[in-house]
Image (cartoon, rainbow, N blue to C red):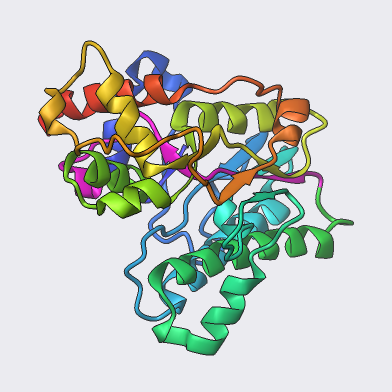
Amino acid sequence: MVSSRSSKGDYMRKVFEDLGDKLELVVVPDIEKEGAFDEAVKGVDAVVHMASPYHFGAVDPAELIDPAIRGTLSILQSALKYGTNIRRIVITTSTAAMVRPTNTPIVFTEDDWNDASIQEVKEKSRDAPGYIKYFASKTLAERAAFDFVEKNKESIGWDLVTIAPPYIFGPMINELSSPSSANASLAEWYQAILESAKSPEELKTSGNAWADVRDIALAHVRAIQQPEAEGRITVSADSFNWHDWVDVVHSLNPSPYPPNSYVQSDPSYDPKTAVRLLNFDTTKARRVLGIDKYISMEQSARDMLEDFRSRGW
C-alpha cells in the first residue's frame, strides 16, 4: 500500500492490524514527482492507482488537471522502468470521463468520452464551472494512461484496466473529523439528506448514478484477478434522483437517526414516473468481472447512517 502521508499510514496499520507483516506501507510524499513510485513498484505483481484530486473548488484548471495527469503517468513510468513482476495495472477513473450534457435520458457506455468538458475548459479556462474542470481532469488523465500504454506496448509486460464508478456511497474506512472531510460524493449525500442542502425541486429533478464503495472495491480486486479484464469497465448500481434517497432513509425501520433528522419527503414525488437523465451500461462489468448484483440503496443508506452516528455526527 502506498500512502502520501505517514499519519494516514499509521491509521491504516491499526485498521488492518490483523494482517501483521503482510501489509507493507510506502510513503510517497509527491506522486507527481518523476520517479516517485520507483521503489514502490519493485517486486509487486499488480498496481491499483486511485489517487487523484477530487473537488470542485479549483480556480485554475491546472490545479486539477496537472496532478491528475502527472500522478497517473508517474506510476506508469515507474512500472515501465522497474515493475518487472507487474502483470496488470488498474486505475480508478470516473464516469465523469464518459458523460456529456443532456436534457433527455441517456445510457452511456465504455465507448463514450467527455470531450465536451475538455472543450469547455479550453474555451473558458478559469471561468469554467468547478465540476467541469474536474470532469476534464479525469478525462485527460484516463486518455493519457491509454496513450502511454499504446506508445510503450512493445516494452511493457503488463496490461491496463480502468474502473469507472459514478457517485460512490457507503460506510467509510478512513479517519475523518467531520462530514465535510469525507469524499465529495459522500459529503454531498450527507448535506442533501441530513442538512437539507438541496431545494425540493433539486431533490426531485437532479441526481446521477451511484454504487456502494464495497462493490467498487470488489471491482478493483476482480479487475486484478480476471485474466480477460481489459480496457475501461463501468461499475454502477443504478441511476438516482436525490429524492430516491430521501424516500429510502424515511423507509428504514428501525432508523439509525430519528426520522425528523432527515430532509422532508415530498409526497408528490413518484419514483416510478420520475425522469433520471443518465445511466450506464454495466454489461462488461457483469460479463468480465462477474458483478451482477449490487448492494441495495437501503443497505447502503443504513450502513452510511450507522457509520455517521458511530462517529458522533
Outermost residue, bottom direction?
A: 123
Relative to 58, is 3 above or below? above
- Quadrant (top left, top right, bottom left, bottom right) of the C terminus: top left
Q: Is residue 302 or residue 10 the one in the foreground?
A: 302
Is residue 283 within the magenta segment? no
Determine if residue 193 is in view: yes
Residue drawn at 73 percent across, 49 percent down:
110
Residue drawn at 81 percent across, 45 percent down:
157
Residue drawn at 64 percent across, 59 percent down:
142
Q: Is residue 261 or residue 5 the one in the foreground?
A: 261
Would you say 256 lies left or right of 237 here? left
Would you say 273 lies left or right of 288 here? left
Relative to 123, is 207 above or below? above
Q: Is residue 47 or residue 122 the one in the foreground?
A: 122
Would you say 237 lies left or right of 58 here? right
Rendering coords of residue 167 (x, y %): 46, 44
Rendering coords of residue 246 (x, y %): 30, 34
The image quadrant of residue 290 is top right
The image quadrant of residue 80 is bottom right
Determine if residue 5 is in view: no
Residues in magenta, as a range: 157-181
- How many marks the image carries: the answer is 0
Q: Is residue 247 or residue 293 the one in the foreground?
A: 247
Rendering coords of residue 161 (x, y %): 71, 44
Outermost residue, right direction?
A: 154
Outermost residue, front direction?
A: 268
Relative to 83, is 52 above or below? below
The image quadrant of residue 242 is top left
